[in-house]
Each structure stands twice: as structure tokens, then as C-alpha cells.
Amino acid sequence: MAITPLLRRPARPRATHGRTALGGPVQGWLYAAPTALFVVALFLIPLLLVLQMSASEWPLLRGNMGLNFPTNFGDAVDNRLFGESIRFTLLYTAITTVLLLGLGLGLALLVQESSAWKGFLRTAFLLPSALGLASASLLFYVLYSPFAGPFADLMSSWGITFLGTPEGALWSTVFLVVWRYAGFYMLLMLVGLQGIPDDVFEAARIDGASRWQTFRYITVPLLRPTFALTTVMCVTGSLLAFDQFYILTKGGPDNSTMTIVQLIYNIAFQGQNSLGVAAALSVIVLAALVVINAVQLRAFRRPEEA
């Protein structure tokens, strides 16, 4: 005769002495502490220092330090290159943003389709992004050189100067930036394209939509978040352009390629040697970037999110 074992009551959980209630928040703060310290040390403290410098007379090496607000801001705006640098920076930003986003989307559409060359093309387009911007600028500086570059003889016979004229210097730098970053924006666009469900495109084909109609009414609207991200990144990076112009043109010829960041550098370390005026100009640029990015993010909101 089988004996049925007695059912035991489940053991009552032991008291954790509050570890369950406190463990989550404490562990969360511990995980966030390194990042918080990083932000405080490398962003908040330098930002507060720049704000203090912008409101003070702050010479580069020696001199009396004291509060002189808002003299630094007035001197920054009254600089003879202030307006010219803003106009050139906005022009450069508009050109690079249109070219990088358009070319990035075009390359993403090209490598999205399954083909035998898909992997090779993706790697080839993305490879220039592995090169640092300063290194790429030095490489193109040699290529553009009328003395040591590989096109020196051709340039001398045809009278071409890549960096000798304002237009040539601008478009030579734009070509460098597009070559360097097109693959990176292609990757971002490709991630956005792969996030669109295939069922949406299949339904459009069943309904008889053409490729242009599918691109206009399905692909572009569903890529709105990707466009928002890439536009903010491209506009911010272009407005803060420095390395490529400092290496290729030094702001020339005749200050025609002077960006706003290069003007800040020149005020701080060349000519005036005034960190206070440079800091004031940096604060103006920071405020403008906040406003521009806020406008961009609001413009890319969906109608139901506005």
C-alpha cells in the first residue's frame, strides 16, 4: 500500500533587513557614479570656469584679474572677424549638412539591397571613418600641396590651386569632410532603414506604389528619428569645425575660411591673448548651439508629439 507523503508548507522567506528596498537605488547610484564624476569633472567644472572667465579680465599669462562683465562680450561681438566668421561657419554648415545627409542616405539605400558586393561596399564606404580627422586633414594637405602633392605637375600646368583661393579652400575642405564622414552617416541611415518593417514595403508594393512613392510616403516619414539624430550631429559638428581648417587653411586665404571656433582660438592664444574675450565668445556659441538644437529637435517632432 503506497503511503502519500505529507505536504510541507513552503518555507517563509527570511528577512532581508531592508536590502531589497535599498539595494536597487544604492546599486543604481553606484553604477551611475563613474559617469556622474566624469560629467562633473570634464563638463560642469570647465563650464563654470568658462562662465567665470567670460565675466572677468583673464589674461593669458600675466596681468590683473577682475570682474569686468559685460566688457568681454562687447569686445567679442565688436571683433572685426566676428560677423565674417559667423557667415562662413553657417555657409559651411549648410553645405556639409546637405551633402552628408543626402550622400549618406543614398549610400545606405545602395548597400541596403542584398547583393554580392554589399559587404565590400559597406566596408569601403565606412573605412575612411576609421581615420582621425586631424590625420585625414594632414593627408589631404599633402595631396593638395602644389609642391609635393601627387597632382603638383597637373596643378601647375593647369593653374589649379586647391587652397589658394577662398572658393577653392572652402570646397577642398568640404570634399575632405564628405570623404571622411559620408560612410559614418551611411551607417546611421542604414540602421534607420533596417528598423523599418518589411511588411510596410510589401504592403506598398501590393497596393501598386512606385519606388518614388514608397520612398516619399513611407521611407522618409519613418526615418524621421534618424534624420533628427543625424541632422543634430552634423549641424553641431559643422558649427564647431576647427581641425580641418586649422590644418588646411589656417583661416586663409585672407581670413576667408575663418570659423567661429578658430576665431576663439586666435583670440585666446594669438594676437589678443585674452582668455576672457575668448571665453565670452565660447558662451555665445554655446547659447546659440542650445537654441539651434532645440529648434531642430522641435522641427523633427511628429505632429502628434508637438
Image (spheres, grey):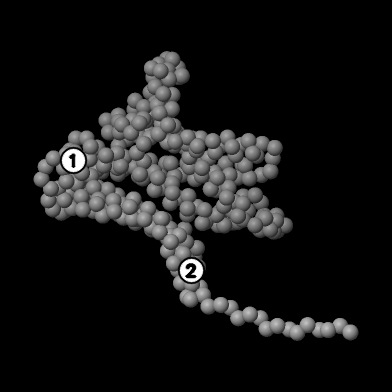
User: Residue at coordinates 27% horizontally, 39% vertically from top-left?
Assistant: 265
Give the alpha-carbon distance from disc 1 to disc 2, as whole Å.
48 Å
Which residue type does callout 2 highlight? Gly
User: Residue at coordinates 54% horizontally, 35% vertically from top-left?
Assistant: 127
Q: Nearer the viewer, residue 198 or 91?
A: 198
Other-residue count near label 2 (Cα within 10 Å), few / some / many at <14 / 14–19 / ≥20: few
Q: Which comes sooner in the sequence, label 1 or label 2? A: 2
Other-residue count near label 1 (Cα within 10 Å), few / some / many at <14 / 14–19 / ≥20: few
Q: For this view, does 23 lie left or right of residue 63?
A: right
Q: Nearer the viewer, residue 130 or 61?
A: 61
User: Residue at coordinates 40% horizontally, 28% vertically from top-left?
Assistant: 138
**Quarter occupied by the C terminus:** bottom left
Q: Name the residue carrying label 1.
A: 60
Callout 2: helix, strand or loop? Answer: helix
Pinpoint residue 51: horizontal percent, then vertical percent: 23, 53
Q: For this view, does 74 lie left or right of residue 174?
A: left
Is the C-beta separation of discs 1 and 2 under 8 Å?
no
In the image, is residue 69 above or below residue 110? below
Q: Nearer the viewer, residue 226 or 6?
A: 6
Residue at the right extreme, as displayed: 1
**Quarter occupied by the N terminus:** bottom right
In the image, is residue 19 above or below residue 177? below
Q: For this view, does 110 lie left or right of residue 180?
A: right
Callout 1: helix, strand or loop? Answer: loop
Q: Name the residue carrying label 2.
A: 24
Does residue 93 show up? no
Does residue 219 show up? yes
Residue 42: give its label.
none
Which residue type does callout 1 highlight? Leu
